[in-house]
Image: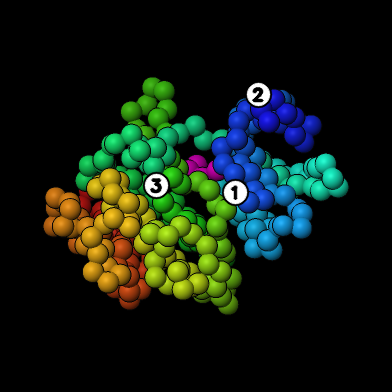
Amino acid sequence: MAGQILGDRYEVQQQLGKKSGRWTLLARDLTNEALVILKLVFVDDELKPDDLKLFKREAEALKSLKHPSTPEYLGSFEMDLPMNGKAMALVQSYIQGKSLDSYLKEGRNFTERESKRIAREVLKILEYLHSRQPPIIHRDIKPSNVLLVTHPGRSKIQVFLVDFGSVKSLSASENTSLTLVGTRGYMPPEQVGGRTVRASDLYGLGVTLVTCLTGTEPSEIPSRGMRLEFETITNLSPEFTTWLKKMVHPALDRRFATSEDAMAALRPLM
């Protein structure tokens, strides 16, 4: 597919992901030579209603976001396919970074200091998302959706949160979401049960940090019932261990309720 021109201006460079009826492509915008991400959903008899709904939600969410650490909405278009089919395309900015998942696959574990910095930066993004009207819940925070970007001439590494394909906006009259999306292991119990609140994103971030600290997938982390006992395989400070335990507590009333609460508790530990 490399070299194919889509939407009369985007030259496909490579395929980054493929699921049933959905493709993610890296492309070059021929009008300005910039690299972009194209997300395609194929509108055919096999299209699941939820796939189209999530595609439209992602587009609407990205349109509303103006944050330096999230992808930028660049446009959308439809295109005809052979055999009378069609596809809808979402265009967003390409972030040239490296995911936490890529580092983990290379065998790198993150230190407590590094994990605290990542936690702080992602919490800043969540504060922005959760304070939108209506609030935006990411619902799929995991190592592959957190990117680290190094800028030439700058020592500070920027943290990005990407892939808003599972996003959900909570209306004023709707404090929860009843659609099951996300990634097993990084979803809190309430999300597995089809319910999502602001604190659900905190759980995903917490498990992501534990995975980065241990190099261990959630399914392999020791647990008792639904509670992760990561402290048995880490050597963290007692204060940070307590903070992480509250991030990944399976019970909503024992977890941080908001990103502001989590940030306030993290700040003295930095």
Q: Quadrant of the N terminus?
A: top right
Overall secondary structure of the magenta stretch? loop
Residue beneath the point at 83% across and 41% down: 82
Q: Hey, which residue is sitting farthest right in the picture?
A: 84
Q: Secondary structure at mark 3?
A: helix
Can residue 256 be seen from the camera position used here?
A: yes
Identify which amino acid the numbered label 3 is placed on.
Pro
Residue 174 versus residue 108: which sits nearer the camera? 108
Mark 2 packing: few (<14 Cα in 10 Å), some, or many (20+)? few
Number of residues whose C-alpha sits closer than 10 Å to that of mark 3, classed few (under 14), some (14–19) or many (20 or more)? many
Residue linked to disc 1: 19
Q: Position of residue 185 (x, y in %)?
A: 38, 59
Badge nearest the viewer, 3 or 2: 3
Label 3 or label 1, whichever comes before in sequence order = 1
Q: How is the image coloured?
A: rainbow
Tell me the SS state at disc 2.
loop
Percent x, y for residue 222? 23, 60
* CA separation in Å, label 1 and label 2: 27 Å
CA–CA distance between discs 3 and 2? Answer: 29 Å
Answer with left or right where residue 42 lies relative to residue 111: right
Disc 1 element: strand
The span shown in magenta is 68-72
Q: Are marks 1 and 2 in contact (CB under 8 Å)?
A: no
Q: Relative to 267, is 8 on the left or the right?
A: right
Which residue is at the front of the view, 2 or 243?
Answer: 2
Q: Earlier in the sequence, mark 1 or mark 2?
A: 1
Identify the residue under disc 2: 33
The vertical placement of 133 against 60, above or below, is below
In the image, what residue occupies the spot 69% across and 63% down? 49
